[in-house]
Amino acid sequence: MNLGIRILSVQIKNIKNTKNGIVEFDSKKKIEEADFRLDSSDVIGIYGPNGSSKTSMVNAIDILKKVIISQNSNKNVFTNKFNSFEFFDIITSNEQTASIEMSFFHDGVDKRIFFYEIKFIKNNEEKKSVIINEKLTYKQYDSKNQKWSKESKLIEVDFSKDLSSFISPLAFLSSMKKIDKNIPNELVLLRGISNSKDSTFIFSDELINILLRNDEYKSIAVAVRNMKIFAIHNMHVYNNKSISQIAANDAIPFFYKNETENLINTFVGRFNIFGESKLQISLKNVIYEYFQEIDIVINKIIPNMRVKVVDLGNTILDDGSEGFKCEVVSIRNDVQIPLRLESDGIKKIISLISAMVDVFNNKYSILIVDEFDSGIFEFLLGEILISFKQNAKGQLLFTSHNLRALEVIKESIIFSSIDENDRYISYPRISDTGNLRSQYIKRLFLDDNNKFAEQIDIYDIYRAFVKAGELIKHE
């Protein structure tokens, strides 16, 4: 199913310790210059010291995804509902509001760039953050004059205003009234639903259906619907929470997608690592197909290793439905061992493979991974990144502390800085024979004006350890 959606940029404001930060994919410049060839990968690695807001970007994208799909009703998709209490802690402590903006390119008959911005405000009494504003604007490409139009507002929803004025522009409401005079009442009802569920107004099925009823907005409605489907099925986000479950030997997230020309079915769930898993009987074939896909790739990444799922028989699930029991094992030299005994790095790779396969082969899919290098041998990390950079079709955004990537995909690296008002910056162009890793380390230690990290003095570290030791009485 060709959704034609590609992410161009993400901007965050007042998220954790970031006042302002923006990340832009290479696709953004290409699209703005009317180069619509999207047949190559689009990779970004975010590097920087601990506490420099690398994870803030991943958290923001994860929140945006959850908001967009918050009214999704596809039972095959396991989704974490937008957690307004969790987001309260992510907003900068001395600020009351935060915002996330993502720009999308829709590669349809009418080529458009959409800008979706969502704003949150703290509710200090209930210790949660709620959506206060949503806005969707766009630019359209004029193929006759070969230029982009000025940015136009499709719709803005301001929940702080009363029912008579919470939607703008007036031209939108006027156009909708001509189609059906009851539409304004439908929009008021939708506002109430969105408020009560902490969910999106703009990406709701109800608004999309309203747009589809108006010929003036039909093509835009298709793009909005495709952006929502993209977020559900093609936007794979692995944050620290998902990865920590693997490290804790708790669960391993899995993703499997079956796609045809007109339909996408996505199955997202978790395997219990510590012992057997109990799953719906309807997922049995999906699970076996999923591990066939994993097995093809894992054997090339980690030679002489295979993985499979062992069927432990049928069972009855807690809700009374029919299920089956299974356990995931790895195989080395014909010896089977439970997957829980493998390293965190291997378990992490296994959980990511299916999403990686999707992004590798689909130019309209994206994988976002926090601490991609965690537990993964640096040489293997480099080989995976080289393969993605040279041969993949989709998009990859990851954070990392491992400097190996600076050597293999140096033109795709963004550094998190110590400037809270400009968190993500690109390093000046390095020649093909230059070493970005060496240049970065040199600047960290020798450049008095460096924006990448606070200066670190090895002798200060030595003295601090000695001084701390003096607080402890030794016999």
Image: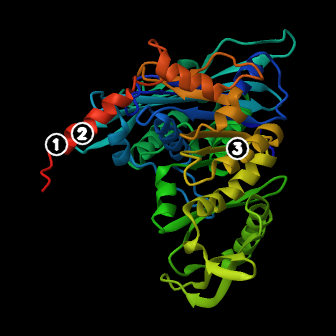
- Secondary structure, mark 2, is helix
Viewer-nearest residue: 180 or 55:
55
Which amino acid is tagged 3? Gly
Q: Which of the 4 image quadrants contains residue 338?
A: bottom right
Question: Does residue 8 appear left or right of residue 321 in this picture?
Answer: right
Q: Could you tell me if residue 291 is visible in this image?
A: yes
Disc number at residue 466?
Answer: 2
Q: Residue at x 74, y 72 (%)?
A: 306
From the viewer's perspective, tell me whether residue 126 is left or right of residue 106.
left
Callout 2 touching callout 1 (CB < 8 Å): yes
Using the image, determine if residue 370 lies above or below residue 259: above
The location of residue 8, given as percent across then percent down, is 67, 28
Instruction: Name the disc covering residue 470, or none.
Output: 1
Q: CA distance from mark 2 to mark 3?
A: 38 Å
- Closer mark to the observer between disc 1 and disc 3: 1
- Marks 2 and 3, the one that precedes in the sequence: 3
Q: Local crowd at mark 2 within 10 Å, few (<14), some, or many (≥20)?
A: few
Look at the picture and state if 25 lies above or below 261. Answer: above
